[in-house]
Image (spheres, rainbow, N blue to C red):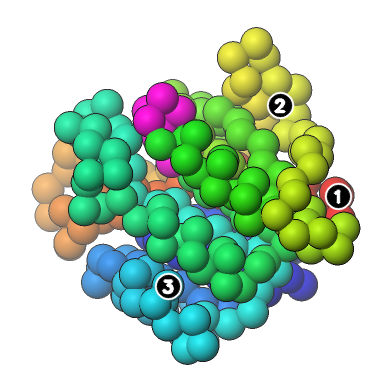
Amino acid sequence: MMRHVDLCSGIGGFALGFEWAELSRPVLFCDIEPWSRKILAKHWPDVPIAEDVKELANDPDGIVPDCDILTAGYPCQPFSVAGQRKGQEDDRHIWPYIRKIVAQKRPTWCVFENVYGHISLGLDEVLSDLEVEGYAARTFIVPACATDAPHRRDRLWIIAKNVAYANGKSGEAQHQRCVLGEQNSKGAARGYTNGSVQKGRFWLPEPPVGRVANGIPRRVDRLRGLGNAIVPQIAMRIGMTIKETG
């Protein structure tokens, strides 16, 4: 099993999906939201949880363990069309810190997720930085509805492999094909049907939490957690593809 460091973890969508794929086990979570950290601690009680990506980036010999795969659904507010789109001027723009951790730990694989608006604002910086660090990256648009969720929710997925390390070269990225189902002309991956199979039963993409129901404990936290969460079925498919790629 690969060792997995999960930054901007949310409620653990990457870790859950990768566990379904039998790809990895988490060795570190990091999330700034206290409620999300409680959820992570409940489901992965033996995994340490950090609070701030910036602190991790500035402490290279500290808490971040060596890992084979690093993930992050880093904050979307700097790029989202629903916000002011300040990009690098937004104080929630933490990609430079994530890049620093990638450079320090040199994982074999990196997987990142963000909103569709990131394509036109900030993505070039991310891909350029990954190339400088010796990673070959491929991007995909995979919507939540690809796993039978009842809404579209287009999301950008960035998958990068450390080809500089694999080839014994530094600072030189070589493009490598990474396939996630068939792609249409817009780059959206296809081929996901009926959610994930768990012990012979289909797992629904979204739990019935009742978005307008009354009486749900910590309702605001739950809605925020779901809104920020990735779809774990997509992470599972990515994990299966990484296993096949080697």
- The quarter in which the N terminus is drawn is bottom right
Amino acid tagged 1: Glu
- In percent of width and height, residue 126 lies at 50, 44
Q: Is residue 86 left or right of residue 112?
A: left
Q: Is residue 173 left or right of residue 6?
A: right
* Residue extent of the magenta highlight: 114-121
- The tag earlier along the polypeptide, 3 or 2, is 3
Say which residue appears at 45% left-offset and 28% top-offset.
Answer: 119
Q: Which is closer to the viewer, label 1 or label 2?
A: 1
Q: Which is closer to the viewer, label 3 or label 1?
A: 3
Secondary structure at numbered mark 1: helix
**Residue position marked by numbered label 3 in the rendering:** 57
Picture quadrant of residue 122: top left
- In percent of width and height, residue 134 lies at 70, 54
Q: Nearer the viewer, residue 218 or 111?
A: 111
Amino acid tagged 3: Ala
Secondary structure at numbered mark 3: helix
Amino acid tagged 2: Gly
Say which residue appears at 70% left-offset and 54% top-offset.
Answer: 171
Q: CA distance from mark 1 to mark 2?
A: 16 Å
Residue 11 has which mark?
A: none
At label 2, counting other C-alpha atoms closer than 10 Å, the crowd grade (few under 14, some 14-19, many 20 or more) is few
- In percent of width and height, residue 188 lies at 60, 22
* Any part of residue 191 in sight: yes
Residue 244 has which mark?
A: 1
